[in-house]
Image (tube, helix red, strand yellow):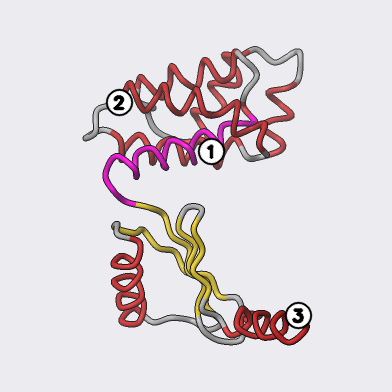
Amino acid sequence: MAELATIARPYAEALFKAVAASDAPALSAQMNALALVAADDRLRGFADNPKTQAAQVFDVIGAAVGGALDAKIANLLHAIIDNGRLAALPEMAAQFQTLVNARSGVSEATIQSAFAIDDAQLAQVIATLEKRFGRKLNAKVEVDPELIGGIRAIVGDEVLDTSVKARLEQMKVALTA
């Protein structure tokens, strides 16, 4: 995984530097659509076939995304295909989104809960987490029954784990030490 991140970083940074702040959300959506298409094993098999030309791969991806690509995205896609870096496209999209979020002061957050969270509770949790982490959060919720109760919030490389499972693990370590 680290290798893909290393390959993807220069592409994501180059696109980020080439885009105006106002255009970034639309381009981020296009990058995410391209990442979904590039993640398909059949497409990558088609692209890796020595008989397939780069223009054919570009046309297939363009048709799969449906709609006109921004000129900067199209140029990036040509470079990715020409350099045989299609497998790294999902990581490029993720890194580009991270750069866009950093520019706007927003971070992606994953909230894991043992039970489903309704909208009112989610708004409360997000407000508390935004105060705790000191930035605006785009949150997605995942239900993980193994947590037993409580939540685990993952923001970037920071984890705030208030789940029952984590507390039981802490008690186990304390008792066996």
What x and y, as percent, mark residue 31? Answer: 44, 35
Q: Quadrant of residue 54?
A: top right
Sequence-wise first label, 2 or 3: 2
Horizontal arrangement in the rendering, residue 72 relative to residue 39 (left or right)? left
The disc placed on residue 139 is none
Q: Which residue is mark 2?
A: 19
Q: Quadrant of residue 39?
A: top right
**Mark 1, other Cα within 10 Å: few <14 / some 14–19 / many ≥20:** many
**What residue type is disc 2 on?**
Val
Q: Which residue is mark 3?
A: 177
Over which residues does the magenta segment extend? Answer: 87-106
What x and y, as percent, mark residue 68? Answer: 37, 28
Which structural element holds mark 3?
Answer: loop
Whether 160 is drawn above or below 68: the answer is below
**What residue type is disc 3 on?**
Ala
Whether 38 is drawn above or below 17: the answer is below
Q: Which residue is mark 1?
A: 35
The answer to whether residue 123 is magenta is: no
Sequence-wise first label, 3 or 1: 1
**Mark 2, other Cα within 10 Å: few <14 / some 14–19 / many ≥20:** some
**What residue type is disc 1 on?**
Ala
What x and y, as percent, mark residue 25? Answer: 31, 40
Q: Nearer the viewer, residue 21 or 27?
A: 21
